[in-house]
Amino acid sequence: MDRLRTTDTPADRVVPPSGHTAWLTSFTAGAMAFLAVFALALSMASGRLADRWSEALSRTATIRISAPGEQMEAQTRAVLDLLATTPGVARARALSDVEQRALLEPWFGPDLPIESLALPRLIEVTEGDGGYDAEGLRLRLAAEAPGAVLDDHTRWRRPLAVAAGRLRLIGTVSMILIGTTMAAMITLAANAALASNAQVIRVLRLVGARDAFIARAFVRRFTLRAFAGALAGALAGMLAVALLPSADAAGGFLTGLGFHGWGWLWPLVLPFAAAGVAFGATRAAALAKLREFQ
């Protein structure tokens, strides 16, 4: 009697070491951890990419000059001189025909006769640390170069910032859904194990075992199964992410996908999170089921 109350080893025999509850718990934890690694990788990579684009656009602006051919060089020089005396502008330069052709090539192909088209001249403006007064610069441009229009990339930055926030939210919601699914599956497995061992549990009660002691046996076994399964799933997910093609091989589509530096430690948190979910779900299910047996 005392031995039953002081150690979990005899009580562990209440939970079948194999069978559908064993593989269901381990498989569910492993599969959910594997998916969680990819959800985490995609969320982090997408957030980094959106932040990088937003940061790059926040430091640059573009001035578009539309003018007749004979006035283009004069207006371009006037705009460059104006920018040279504008506080907050670190650097300004006019894009060459080769650079403008490279910008248009993805849409129109490499054979675009750019020299025969009346394309506007683009000037790239790099913002300094203090920033510049965009509205003031627009007024100066309107007075000194009527054909010049300032695009400070605000309409580009705002969607990227919104996208970064939504991607992080999607990642968080995905992790919550994965954890909820894992808890539901482990709860079903625990209930099945308890139901299949109802007669053994009644015998244990007759010899003096308390419900907390019996529940502890189920909690311990299912928590260890979930931890082991989630660890295997997390390691498999990390290996799959590491084996993804590089950005060059993927044509740029998978640029930044994966973990960087200390970010590789985040997937290793998943087995402990899975064990915590299994602990809470199994304990709640076990105590509820034991109350039904009374």
Image (spheres, grey):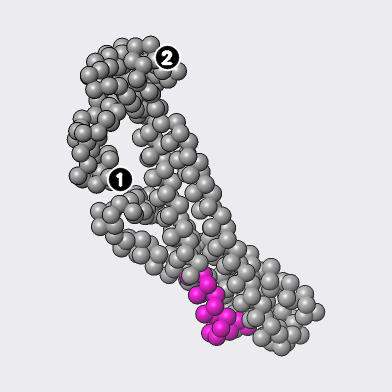
In front of the other: 267 or 176: 176
Give the side of residue 32 with respect to residue 259, left or right. Answer: right
Q: In this view, does 260 lie above or below 65?
A: below
Q: Residue furthest right?
A: 294
Give the side of residue 250 with respect to residue 173, left or right. Answer: left
Local packing at callout 2 (Cα closer than 10 Å; few below 14, some 14-19, many 20+) is few
In front of the other: 114 or 41: 114
Q: Mark 1 points at which residue?
A: 107
Q: Mark 2 points at which residue?
A: 139
Q: In which quarter of the image is the C terminus?
A: bottom right
Q: Mark 2 falls on what kind of element?
A: helix
Give the side of residue 183 with respect to residue 82, left or right. Answer: right
Q: Which residue type carries mark 1? A: Trp
Q: Which residue type carries mark 2? A: Leu
Whether residue 99 is visible, yes or no, is no
Mark-to-mark CA distance, 1 and 2: 33 Å
Local packing at callout 1 (Cα closer than 10 Å; few below 14, some 14-19, many 20+) is few
Which portion, as a residue range, is magenta?
14-30
User: Is residue 21 in the magenta section?
Assistant: yes
**Label ID, residue 20:** none
The prevailing secondary structure element of the residues shown in magenta is: helix
Q: Mark 1 falls on what kind of element?
A: helix
